Image (cartoon, grey):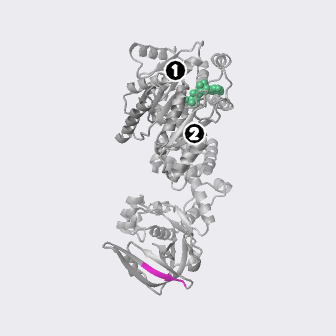
Amino acid sequence: MADFLQQDIMYLPGVGPRRKEILSKELGINTFGDLLERYPYKYVDRTKVYTIDTVSPDMAFVQVIGEILSFEMTTISPRKKRLVAHFTDGTGVCDLVWFNSVNYVRENLHPRKKYVVFGKPGVFNGRIQFSHPDIDDADKIQLNDMGMQPYYTTTEKMKKAGLTSRSIERLTKTLLAKMSTPLSETLPPFITERLHLISRDDAVRLIHYPKTTDDVRRAEMRLKFEELFYVQLNILRYASDHRRKYRGYIFQHVGQQFNWFYSHNLHFELTGAQKRVMHEIRADMRSGRQMNRLLQGDVGSGKTLVALMSMLIAIDNGYQACIMAPTEILAEQHLQTIRTFLRGMDISVELLTGIVKGKRRQEVLDGLISGRVSILVGTHAIIEDNVQFNRLGLAVIDEQHRFGVAQRARLWTKSENPPHILVMTATPIPRTLAMTIYGDLDVSVIDELPPGRKPVVTIHKYDDQMTSLYSGIRNQILKGRQVYIVYPVIKESEKSDLKNLEQGYEGLLDVFPQFRLSKVHGKMKDKEKEAEMEKFVSGETQILVATTVIEVGVNVPNASVMVILDAQRFGLSQLHQLRGRVGRGADQSFCILVTKRQLTKETRRRIDIMCDTNDGFQIAEADLKLRGPGDLEGTQQSGIAFDLKIANIAKDGQIVQMARDEAQKIVDTDPTCSSPEYQILWDRLKVLRNTNINWAAIS
Ligand code: ADP
Ligand code: MG
């Protein structure tokens, strides 16, 4: 069987060298097996035949059976012709219309012969018409056999060469007919039986050749499950092997520092979500396994505090901790926050970023080696080779998507065993996606904001309403508040975008002569940028005109208005991140989304979602559904979500969960891959790892 599937596609009847080249180039189909795994993207029910007098233009695809009465060829332009065939089944007459390959069609169709016509009905000059319908010889197809008509992806180049969806369908059916032995099973019976999944062989045949919608459902279920199951098994297997190879430091007790902090320095109650997450982290840190935990929580949900308390536990157990931020400003903010929280306690907290230089830097480095420094706050500078800790026990990474998997791994060289790792992100990633992308991380979620926060009010304005918007901004500033105005510089390299921002900035200087403005964009030198930002953070300027560089983590509680211009050019998650910059103080905050009046339906929907909800997860789910996983921030590092042949991470969340649960059970019961009952799974996994680049990359 394996040999059969490996056969060169060229040797399938109907292919040959020319088609082979196109199939290979356009769809990556080189073997029989490749063709078999190109699944249809939709089906149309062809069991039903309509009479022409009952067909109306509001129907989806329909089929009619009848014969051609006559042809009519008209010349539209020297190079363009239109062919109409008048077609009847006795109940009425309709028109079949072609604009391409008209000569070919004309030569191959004959009056007084019975045809099955299949297509989307429209209406022209008061008559039903089918434009470019599928046509089959009625004698050659048996309607009862047609069942559901599969549709396969094709490209323009393929269509030009005559390789249509129908051709792929025919080739696939030829292949299925040639397949004399059943496809070998890739899931053990204890899984297929319990989950009521059909066999692999049945599924592959049915997915290409379904008779009913129920056939499609059962085939899809089996194939999607299998696909997602092996993705999860791969990830969990990797995580498990990693854990057996490396021991985790055991932080047995919560000690003096933590307790002192909790009873003397912490002046508010933890939220329920913070407490739950602390329990999860505690359990990880004393399990003897290295913690790899992703902490998701909306901006302002109190992740930093959770990180700090985890660091105190590390210190209580005789270890050091570090926290890495993506920018110097954020690192400095963390330093301040942490020092303020730890006021009066004997814990040395130091900063290490690119601007910490010379003697100061040496002092910090010495303090780390000697163990005098307990908490190091910094940027990428922390992972440089010359930074050596005495006993690094916990590394916190803030805002994950700026730190790749490889950078995370570099932390492990900083201590004898890999330190526990806590990754914090405010980019809410739907759980099923997180499982697939950061599958080696356990996920904790803070889904509750500290009490007393006033949710940000989001308002949609059109760009011809700027005058009233400006006066609103003026009022807020006169009340002592600060304002962000964000321009859509989507690609920092695009000059026209940057011009927008520059011009906008000049214009705002005229609109607000009485206020001071800062300007920040990604093309500025780091130093310049930091200086401008600092002016806004310290309150010296009232308005910050910026691009999305301010997206990540900056905390200015006094800022109460976020204006986003050309909001239609931003993705939902990005808008939500930007909005998270306000609403951090006690005052009512506003987010104003400015767009032009003409908007597409989808854009309007996006803006509506933003105005309706502040829930980051709801927004991320909506974003995932609107745009697919490829556009979500942080997902680019992993090709896995896009390599899927049939499952869809955005839509098949439930199956992802099922697959995850099954895979977890198996990895837990057979940690060393030695149980014969599971051999079929480990063998299959080996094959997949060998044939899939993205899988190899994470294992
Ligand atoms: P995040 O890092 O998730 O964006 P922070 O940790 O910066 O959020 O918290 C935002 C603000 O809320 C900080 O000023 C923090 O001190 C405060 N905070 C955190 N947890 C609580 C809580 N349980 N009750 C009240 N305030 C809190
Ligand atoms: Mg934060």
- In this view, 419 is above or below 316: below
Q: Quadrant of ligand 2?
A: top right
Tag 1: Cα neighbours inside 10 Å, few (<14), some, or many (≥20)?
A: many
Name the quadrant containing residue 277.
top right
Identify residue for label 2.
458
Residue 414 visible somewhere in the drawing? no
Separation (CA) of disc 2 from disc 1: 32 Å
Helix, strand or loop at mark 1: helix
Residue 690 picture location, percent across and down: 46, 49
Query: 24 or 554: nearer the eye?
Result: 554
Disc number lying in front (2 or 1)? 2
Q: Are discs 2 and 1 less than 8 Å apart at CB?
A: no
Name the quadrant containing residue 61.
bottom right
Q: Residue at point 59% right, 70% down? A: 211
SS assignment for the magenta stretch, majority: strand
* Left or right: where 603 falls relative to 677: left
Query: 406 or 566: nearer the eye?
Result: 566
- In this view, 621 is above or below 43: above
Q: Which residues are magenta?
A: 84-89
Q: Residue at point 51% right, 37% down? A: 469
Helix, strand or loop at mark 2: strand
- In this view, 332 is above or below 24: above
Identify residue for label 1.
335
Q: Residue at point 56% right, 77% down? A: 143
